[in-house]
Image (cartoon, helix red, strand yellow):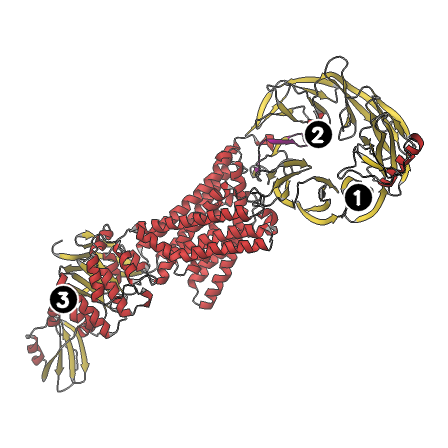
């Protein structure tokens, strides 16, 4: 009998199944052939699965009613439960098979699975993350929702006699149910009463209006209007809600619930659970009541409907509990340690609404950052955050950048660059990149604009961040290889084209203003002069200089002699150009002779190119030039001469403000400015121990003098390449050093005294220090944060 | 089981605000063809669905072969053949396929007997159901209902929509099968002329309960219509005992009696009737007369 029933189900739906799958395949191939954007394919797969489930469910029982065969099948000597279970088993199996087919398509055909939300503008707003069709997503989230949809469709199909009507009503009803399921999310994250209204409205209107409407045309019209509206809203909510669920479950490592992004208070949880239960019960009872009084409505049919309701109810309640339980656990955390501000949490992916208890936060793994303003510690993300296999993460300002290969199957080699607004936890796909990314990004105009330079393709892209959302406003693709020299205080951008050796100035909209300075010509002039004056043996007439493709820093150049004999000549340019804050001056260093280290340091006035080489250096290797706020002055350090000079570029007069040995770091300045430019920190060789000596100077900008505040020897500083060993507190009253041992040294800048903080760990990262002098550390390979003081050590966050 | 195939005791069934069955009692003895008569919408189909366990009564109990319909619907349907009006078959199946499909539900399905029926009814096995005529569909339904040699055959308006010839053919088949197999049959129909040809007993369902029940012959004998002729039109209604209806047409008066006997003719003479003429009643006449309810003031409605 079961075999016969299964045979019947298959025979009735096989054409639908085959046509649907073939349709998807053909449409995919067409879209792929015409190179449509990935989001259409994404959307295609998600929606076709949804549509398949709904149509299948809607036809499960209506097909019997439509053809009048329900009396026949139900009057056979078979229990209604067997009919229900066969239909359900068949339906669920068909849905899973269809889903598997979709997964195969996704991985075979889709260039970048996972950027549906990121690339579809309509879903971008208020959508916190993208949906990645990874195994958990497809296996758990989408399937659960689709099963919920399926059982809803089954309920509807027992009451209606038309498959089409049943499908449309299913969309409306399930959209409503979906909202209820996710009402916690809706209430606490991106609640809009409009959304709720527009879902409830068609549902109620549908039930009340259609039940009493006798005008057949009005009835039909309202069916279509309301159902299409309902479908649209359902899809929006499905994507938005699914994104949220995905975000939640993704952070629940191995279903661990401690890191759910949903942090609710117990009272809110209870309220939401009760509300959800009430609403779900109400809607299901309404559906049931709508059909129960129909004359001769078979009791067996009611039983089938009840069973489907039971399943829906189970799914809904499970979803609610899945959300509520982890939230309850999260409440155990001391949120006051994590959440620092009401609206913004610079550097931290927190979503805070109306302060606690309406609060939620996305807490990720492994990576932590410190709020520069407050010194508080927060986590920001990890290697498996949302994009599996992303290669790089960097944090600038309040934004994190992820670049990752978009496809795991190797058919395409496209890369994507994602940006995440850490204050809202929203992610955006900035661009896809065809080759290995060599990206430099820079914020300017008070963080409202972002310039991204792909140094591989030499494409400059300008984004304007409006309402927290980055939007591409300009793209520039000039020949040659450019590097960004800098951005001046007027938001003008200066690019150095190493192919033609020209510096070009762009305005803040990435519109070219002028070519300011021909570096190549100047280099040729300097080197020619040098050979003519200093190295007469060569007596070359230099005709060309090839700069490095990517940078103009410290790489070989090539000279051609008059006799057309190629002569390799090494000169260094750099270590890098240094642009004055107002964009009017450019300083560079040119080492002319690698054997004698003869060098020339010059500064040019932009844009007229007036060159001044009054400052001549010999046998030194200058490091970074540190501009003072007064752009006419620059700090220049000479590690070998162990001094720091202050140079007035207007008259070329230099003044030594710091003397003493300086710890030399390649390509790094041996001096550190505090962000407020009031302190200068230097590291030097210690005369008394094997470690380093830390010297802290207070800089007086009026007298242009430095006063030693404190000096302490015996620090084991480690490798600067790994990062700065020191951290400042927000108000610059505290300074702390990582000594790469089990202790930390803290300095009170106001009092000038040092104190040692012992930690229980040998291997940890120094995260920051707050204004009170409390230090935050994170042990390696542990997602924990400790707050330590001289007397106390307290675990404040644990994953 | 006390010799009855069907026992219905005091059942009520309410749909929404409408009471369809009210304190219904019914018994169908074994081996008879029982006709359940009633106007459209009176609750015949509901009664049958309750008997088969497809609907549950709000009150009372029903038994088929001694099995409670509410608890043993599946078992009951194993031993009952059921054909209903509007019970569509899967049009995409062939006759052979639906016979196979249907056979899987019955433990006692007799494949040879079903094949024999198909042959007897001249049904082409490879034809799709969607291509069959209504007559052939009825025969196929009957085949599906009889293939497991049911002890009780339930026909719910099974001949509705068929033309007279096909209907006669269909009913003849049933009579033939009942005679040969000894089945009990419950027929629900409003086509009384057909019923009269085949039923042994009838029950008339009206206002939610059985108003008249018994052997058809007995009922026909006990109900009699008399035509009385007077010299002058009678001034008043007679309102004799056991009167079901009384109609005045000038000098002529038509009176329908229940429990009629010859003794009543004395009463007619005493009333001054010049002539007394009995009129034969068909089942249809009887049905029509019985559903005319006398009002409290003696008028008929």
Q: In the rendered view, does A652 fall on the left or right side of A200?
A: right
- Residue drawn at (70%, 29%) of the image: A730
- Residue drawn at (42%, 61%) of the image: A211
Question: Pointer 2 indicates a residue of which chain?
Answer: A
* Number of the front mark, 3 or 1: 1
Residue B162, horizontal then vertical, whole percent: 26, 71
Front residue of A535/A778: it is: A535
Q: Local crowd at mark 2 within 10 Å, few (<14), some, or many (≥20)?
A: many
In the displayed image of the protein, which residue is found farthest to the right? A533
Front residue of B47/A61: it is: A61
Front residue of A629/B158: it is: B158
- Segment tinted magenta in the rendering: A360-376
Would you name the residue on which mark 1 appears?
A492
Would you name the residue on which mark 3 appears?
B200
Sequence-first tag of 1 and 2: 1
Question: Pointer 3 indicates a residue of which chain?
Answer: B
């Amino acid at each position: 009998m079961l075999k016969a029933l299964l045979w019947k189900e298959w025979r009735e739906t096989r054409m639908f199944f085959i046509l649907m799958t073939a349709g998807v395949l053909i449409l995919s191939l067409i879209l792929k052939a015409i190179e449509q954007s990935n989001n259409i394919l994404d959307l295609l797969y998600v929606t076709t699965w949804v549509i398949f489930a709904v149509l299948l469910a809607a036809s499960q029982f209506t097909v019997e009613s439509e053809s009048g065969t329900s009396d026949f099948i139900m009057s056979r000597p078979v229990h209604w439960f067997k009919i229900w279970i066969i239909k359900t088993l068949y339906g669920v199996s068909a849905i899973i098979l269809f889903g598997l087919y979709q997964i195969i398509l996704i991985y075979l055909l889709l260039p970048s699975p996972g950027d549906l939300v990121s690339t579809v503008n309509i879903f971008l707003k208020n959508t916190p993350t993208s949906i990645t069709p990874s195994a958990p997503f497809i296996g758990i989230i989408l399937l659960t929702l689709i099963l919920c949809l399926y059982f809803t469709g089954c309920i509807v199909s027992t009451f209606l006699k038309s498959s089409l009507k049943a499908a449309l009503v299913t969309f409306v009803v399930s959209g409503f149910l979906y909202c209820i399921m996710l009402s916690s999310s809706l209430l606490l994250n991106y609640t809009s009463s409009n959304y709720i209204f527009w879902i409830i409205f068609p549902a109620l209107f549908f039930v009340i209006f259609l039940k009493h409407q006798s005008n057949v045309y009005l009835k039909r019209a309202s069916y279509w209007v309301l159902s299409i509206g309902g479908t649209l809203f359902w899809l929006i909510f499905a994507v938005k809600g699914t994104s949220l669920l995905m975000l939640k479950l993704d952070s629940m490592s191995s279903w661990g619930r401690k890191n759910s992004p949903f942090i609710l208070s117990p009272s809110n949880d209870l309220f939401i659970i009760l509300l959800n239960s009430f609403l779900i019960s109400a809607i299901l009872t309404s559906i049931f009541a709508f059909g129960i009084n129909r004359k001769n409505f078979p009791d067996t049919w009611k039983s089938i409907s009840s069973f489907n309701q039971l399943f829906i109810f189970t799914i809904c309640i499970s979803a609610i509990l899945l959300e509520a339980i982890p939230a309850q656990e999260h409440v155990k955390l001391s949120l006051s340690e994590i959440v620092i501000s009401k609206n913004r949490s610079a550097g931290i992916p927190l979503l805070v609404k109306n302060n606690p208890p309406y609060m939620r936060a996305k807490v990720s793994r492994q990576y932590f950052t410190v709020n520069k303003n407050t010194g508080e510690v927060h986590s920001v993300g990890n290697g498996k955050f949302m994009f599996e296999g992303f290669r790089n993460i960097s944090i600038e300002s309040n934004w994190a950048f992820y670049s990752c290969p978009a496809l795991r199957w190797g058919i395409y080699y496209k890369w994507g660059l994602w940006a995440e607004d850490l204050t809202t936890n929203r992610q955006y796909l900035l661009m896809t990149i065809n080759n290995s990314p060599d990206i430099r990004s820079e914020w300017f105009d008070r963080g409202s604009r972002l310039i991204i330079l792909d140094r591989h393709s030499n494409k400059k892209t300008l984004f304007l961040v409006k309402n927290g959302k980055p939007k591409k406003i300009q793209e520039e693709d000039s020949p040659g290889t450019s590097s960004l020299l800098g951005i001046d205080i007027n938001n003008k951008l200066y690019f150095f084209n190493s192919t033609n050796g020209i510096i070009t100035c762009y305005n803040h909209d990435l519109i070219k203003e002028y070519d300011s300075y021909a570096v190549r010509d100047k280099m040729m002039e300097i080197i020619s002069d040098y050979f003519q004056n200093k190295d007469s043996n060569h007596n070359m007439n230099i005709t060309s200089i090839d700069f490095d493709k990517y940078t103009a820093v410290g790489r070989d150049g090539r000279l051609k002699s008059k006799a057309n004999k190629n002569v390799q000549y090494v000169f260094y340019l750099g270590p890098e150009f240094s642009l004055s804050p107002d964009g009017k001056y450019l300083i560079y260093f040119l080492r002319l002779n690698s054997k004698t280290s003869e060098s020339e340091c010059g500064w040019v006035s932009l844009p007229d190119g007036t060159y001044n080489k009054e400052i001549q250096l010999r046998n030194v290797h200058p490091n970074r030039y540190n501009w003072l706020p007064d752009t006419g002055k620059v700090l220049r350090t000479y590690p070998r001469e162990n001094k720091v000079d202050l140079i007035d570029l207007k008259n070329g007069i230099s003044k030594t403000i710091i003397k003493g040995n300086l710890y030399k770091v390649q390509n790094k300045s041996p001096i550190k400015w505090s962000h407020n430019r009031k302190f200068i920190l230097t590291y030097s060789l210690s005369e008394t121990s094997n470690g380093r000596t830390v010297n802290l100077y207070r800089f007086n900008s009026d007298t242009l003098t430095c006063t030693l505040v404190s000096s302490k020897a015996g620090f084991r500083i480690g490798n600067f390449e790994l990062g700065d060993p020191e951290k400042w507190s927000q108000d610059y009253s505290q300074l702390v050093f990582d000594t790469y041992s089990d202790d930390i040294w803290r300095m009170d800048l106001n009092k000038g005294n040092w104190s040692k903080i012992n930690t229980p760990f040998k291997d940890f990262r120094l995260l920051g220090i707050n204004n009170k002098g409390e230090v935050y550390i994170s042990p390696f390979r542990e997602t924990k944060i400790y707050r330590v003081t001289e007397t106390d050590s307290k675990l404040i966050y644990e994953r | 089981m006390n010799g009855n195939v069907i026992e219905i005791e005091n059942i009520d069934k309410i749909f929404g605000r409408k009471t369809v069955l009210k304190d219904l009692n019914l018994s169908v003895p074994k081996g008879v063809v029982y006709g359940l008569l009633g106007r459209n919408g009176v609750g015949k189909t509901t009664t049958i669905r309750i008997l088969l366990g497809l609907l549950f009564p709000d009150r009372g109990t029903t038994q088929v072969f001694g099995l409670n319909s509410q608890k043993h619907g599946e078992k009951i349907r194993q031993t009952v053949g059921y054909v209903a009006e509007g019970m569509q078959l899967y049009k995409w199946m062939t006759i052979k396929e639906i016979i196979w499909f249907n056979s899987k539900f019955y433990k006692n399905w007799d494949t040879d007997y079903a094949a024999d029926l198909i042959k007897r009814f001249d049904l082409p096995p490879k034809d799709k159901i969607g291509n069959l005529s209504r007559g052939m569909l009825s025969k196929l339904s009957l085949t599906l209902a009889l293939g497991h040699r049911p002890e009780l055959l339930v026909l719910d308006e099974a001949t509705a929509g068929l033309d007279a010839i096909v209907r006669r053919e269909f009913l003849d088949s049933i009579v033939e099968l009942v005679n040969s197999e000894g089945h009990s049959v419950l027929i629900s129909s409003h086509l009384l002329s057909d019923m009269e040809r085949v039923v042994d007993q009838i029950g008339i369902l009206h206002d939610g309960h059985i108003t008249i029940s018994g052997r058809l012959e007995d009922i026909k004998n006990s109900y009699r219509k008399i035509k009385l002729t007077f010299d002058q039109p009678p001034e008043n209604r007679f309102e004799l005992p056991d009167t079901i209806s009384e109609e005045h047409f000038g000098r002529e008066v038509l009176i329908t009696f229940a429990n009629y006997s010859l003794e009543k003719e004395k009463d007619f003479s005493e009333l001054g009737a010049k002539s007394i003429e009995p009129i034969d009643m068909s089942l249809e006449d009887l049905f029509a007369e019985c559903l005319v309810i006398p009002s409290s003031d003696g008028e008929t409605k």
